[in-house]
Image: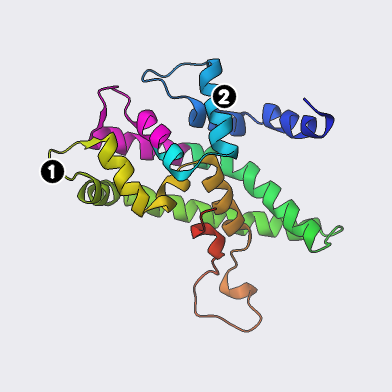
Amino acid sequence: MSAPCRPRSRAVGENSALAGAIFSSFETSASPKDWLNLEEFAVGVYLMTKGTVEEKAHTLFHVIDTSGDGKISRDELTTAMQRRIRTVRKIFPKLLSDQVAIQMEHENVKSLPAVADEAMSHGLQAIEALMEEIEKDIPLAVNQIFLEADLDQDDFITEDEWLFAWQAHPEFVELMTVDGMKKVAQWASVVHTPDDDPHGGNGHAGVDTRLTHVD
């Protein structure tokens, strides 16, 4: 491993939440375990760096299909969404802190730690509110996904049905990956409350459009 990569690797290793989030994204076995085999690790690294939406959707299908029967049930999809929210809640303080630091460096802010603290506070509040809203809407989201994807209406989603559905909605696959988490962190780091707006406001937080952009 080259020298420039070591600080980043060390940061991942020292942050259990970040390591856990990456681990959960890499693991594809039907039964949860506390280790990764070489194939899971190699595929995970590839998907994070080079994977297409179709490849990510394919892997995500097998992560959600915990029974390994080649189809996704409503319970499996619900559990996967709940698990992702728990992971997001653990990983976001680290991702958001990194994003705030990047923005402060970009804006040449070096001697005002209170600025970073305030940005972190607003960002974490925004993320928590977003997670609570998403968690409440999981049953609706599951119903909507089944309406879109369950073409034969047998109350299961096959892999072909899943891939077909996500070709039309790649942003949802993206938001269930680590890259998607980073985009939400970018969004949270630029959210501001009406009190922060010198020109007043309409009572809504500002939203960075990078949240819905898919590379």
Asked if 154 appears above or below 147 in the picture, the reply is: above
Q: Which of marks 2 and 1 is in front?
A: 2
Please provide percent x and percent y for residue 66. Answer: 32, 25
Q: Which residue lies furthest to the bottom in this view?
A: 199
Please tell me in which quadrant of the rendered image residue 105 appears.
Answer: bottom right
Residue toward you, 173 or 205: 173
Identify the residue at horizontal 49%, vertical 37% (top origin): 87
Q: Going from the N terminus, do you reach mark 2 or mark 1 first?
A: 2
80 is within the stretch colored magenta: yes
In this view, 157 is above or below 103 = above
Stretch in magenta: 58-86
The residue under label 1 is 153
Query: Does the magenta-highlighted stretch encompass residue 62?
Result: yes
> In the image, what residue type sits under mark 2?
Ala
Residue in view at x 38 percent, y 51 percent: 134
Q: Is residue 185 above or below residue 35?
A: below
Few, some or many C-alpha atoms within 10 Å of disc 2 (few <14, some 14-19, many ≥20)?
Answer: few
- State the image coordinates of residue 89 (x, y, percent, origin top left): 51, 42
